[in-house]
Image (spheres, rainbow, N blue to C red):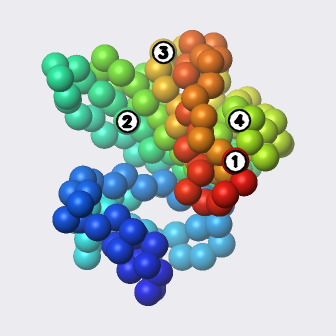
Amino acid sequence: DPQWQSKFEKLFDPSKLAVPFYAVLGDGDHRSDRVAPRLYGLNNPRWTHPKPTYPFQTESHGAKFTFIGVDTTFLLGNISNPDVRIANRVMVHALQMLSSDWKIMFGHHSLYSSGGKRDGERSKKLREVCENWFEKFALDLYIGGNDRSLEILKPKKGVTHVVSGGGGGPEM
């Protein structure tokens, strides 16, 4: 798809930003080819999207960080769908089993926001699915991007929430 050129490769020039990108899908991606983002990583080593929900770890400045990329569209789905059950299981397993100094989760949808979609049905459902696990396994930070705003919210149940969705539009 030529959009990979205009919306990723030219926008995030590797000579100026030579860092890996860890991707998660949004609801718009579920309306098209969900495998394409994984396949794109075969041609571009900076792009990583191994599974719909996946953890990875890294270290920096003497601290260990666990990142968990979640497909929030699956988390919002009907639990009778095997993909939804797998996404939930992987998320909980990553929170439970991975020991680190910092646990950071990121997904397409936000749990909280003061942007245009704040407290919509998706945010409320995502809180129902995730918040008890976040609290139980001491998640430090959740980053969502669907709302068209840039904000850091006061911690909710011990978790700081960041919305980084300003790249999608000029609304806020």
Left or right of residue 106: residue 113: right
Q: Label 1 sits on what residue type?
A: Met
Q: Label 2 sits on what residue type?
A: Phe
Question: Disc 1 designates what residue?
Answer: 172
Q: Nearer the viewer, residue 86 or 133?
A: 133
Tell me the CA gap for discs 4 and 3.
21 Å
**Are the residues flagged by discs 4 and 3 in contact, CB closer than 8 Å?**
no
Please say whether residue 62 is visible from this viewpoint: yes
Badge 4 crowding class, 10 Å Cα cut-off, few under 14, some 14 to 19, many 20 or more, is many
Q: Earlier in the sequence, mark 4 or mark 3?
A: 4
Tell me the CA gap for discs 1 and 3.
30 Å
Name, please, the residue furthest toward the left.
Answer: 62
Callout 2 secondary element: strand
Where is residue 168 shown, x and y percent of the image? 61, 60
Kindly report which numbered mark, 4 or 1, lies closer to the viewer in this rendering: 1
Q: Label 4 sits on what residue type?
A: Ser
Residue at the spot x=37%, y=52% of the render? 22
Question: Disc 4 designates what residue?
Answer: 113
Mark sitting on residue 138: 3
Callout 4 secondary element: loop
Question: Disc 2 designates what residue?
Answer: 67
Screen quadrant of the N terminus: bottom left
Eyeballing the image, is 93 above or below 44? Answer: above
Q: Quadrant of residue 149?
A: top right
